[in-house]
Image: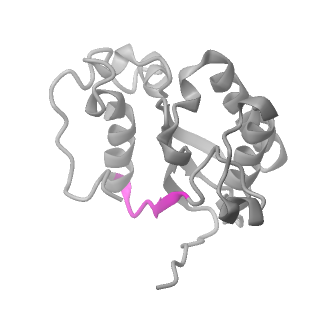
């Protein structure tokens, strides 16, 4: 089976990126800052809007909207992943398999990432809710507001969501978060 990505100029997408073997690279503040830096650098090169974002110790989720006429999210993620990987000292990088060596890959990220083109307003809201509730789902915090590495805090500051959002169990459409 050959996987084909959907590229639609100006579209909104949900993404999941996972670290290789679920290593908790993002558990350290320095690594989080390097990830932020990589994202800022790529946004400066190729514009995109970050609608929602959460960084967990071993993975991240995002909803992005691309500019009109632009559908190349893959180059953006490739550059972000590459910049983050470059920030890790050689001595900290894990030994990689022969297959990864042959493809010149480091043991930092899983090879691919998941993308889902947002279909409509409900799909958009559900994926953003999934992102903001993810730290609770994984048992890292009791309330979404307690997780510091989430765009939920921006939504609260802007008055889009109340500070107690997600204190009740979240109910999503089937399939959301299982992508």
Which residue is nearer to you in this view: 44 or 148? 148
Q: Looking at the picture, does residue 140 appear above or below residue 71?
A: above
* Quadrant, the C terminus: bottom left
Colour pattern: one colour
Q: Is residue 125 left or right of residue 17?
A: left
Point 29% across, 53% down: residue? 176
Q: Is 34 located above or below residue 39 in the figure?
A: above
Magenta-drawn stretch contains 165: no
Does the image show residue 47? no
Q: Quadrant of residue 90?
A: top right
Residue 53: % across, % down: 51, 36
Residue plotted at (61% across, 48% down): 109
Give whichever of 43, 138 is nearer the camera. Answer: 138
Q: Position of residue 15 (x, y in %)?
A: 50, 52
Residue drawn at (55%, 47%) of the image: 20
Whether residue 14 sits left or right of residue 31 in the image: it is left
Farthest right residue in view: 45
Residue appearing at x 15%, y 25% in the figure: 168
Could you say where residue 154 lies in the image, as x and y percent from the top left? 50, 23
Q: Which residues are magenta?
A: 113-121
Q: Is residue 149 visible?
A: yes
Q: State how many labels appear.
A: 0
Against 179, is 168 above or below?
Answer: above
The answer to whether 144 appears left or right of 169 in the picture is right
The residue at the far bottom in this view is: 1
Q: Position of residue 85 (x, y in %)?
A: 74, 40
């Amino acid at each position: 089976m050959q996987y084909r990505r959907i590229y639609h100029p100006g579209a909104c997408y949900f993404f999941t990126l996972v670290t290789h073997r679920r290593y908790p690279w993002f558990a350290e503040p320095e690594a989080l800052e390097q990830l932020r830096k990589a994202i800022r650098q790529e946004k400066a090169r190729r514009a995109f809007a970050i609608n929602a974002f959460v960084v967990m110790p071993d993975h991240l989720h995002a909803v992005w909207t691309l500019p009109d006429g632009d559908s190349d999210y893959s180059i953006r993620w490739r550059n972000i992943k590459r910049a983050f990987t470059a920030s890790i000292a050689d001595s900290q990088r894990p030994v990689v398999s022969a297959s990864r060596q042959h493809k010149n890959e480091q043991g930092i990220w899983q090879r691919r990432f998941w993308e889902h083109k947002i279909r409509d307003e409900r799909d958009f809201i559900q994926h953003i809710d999934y992102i903001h509730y993810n730290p609770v789902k994984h048992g890292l915090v009791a309330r979404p507001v307690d997780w510091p590495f989430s765009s939920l805090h921006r939504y609260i500051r802007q008055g889009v969501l109340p500070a107690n959002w997600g204190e009740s169990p979240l109910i999503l459409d089937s399939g959301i978060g299982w992508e």
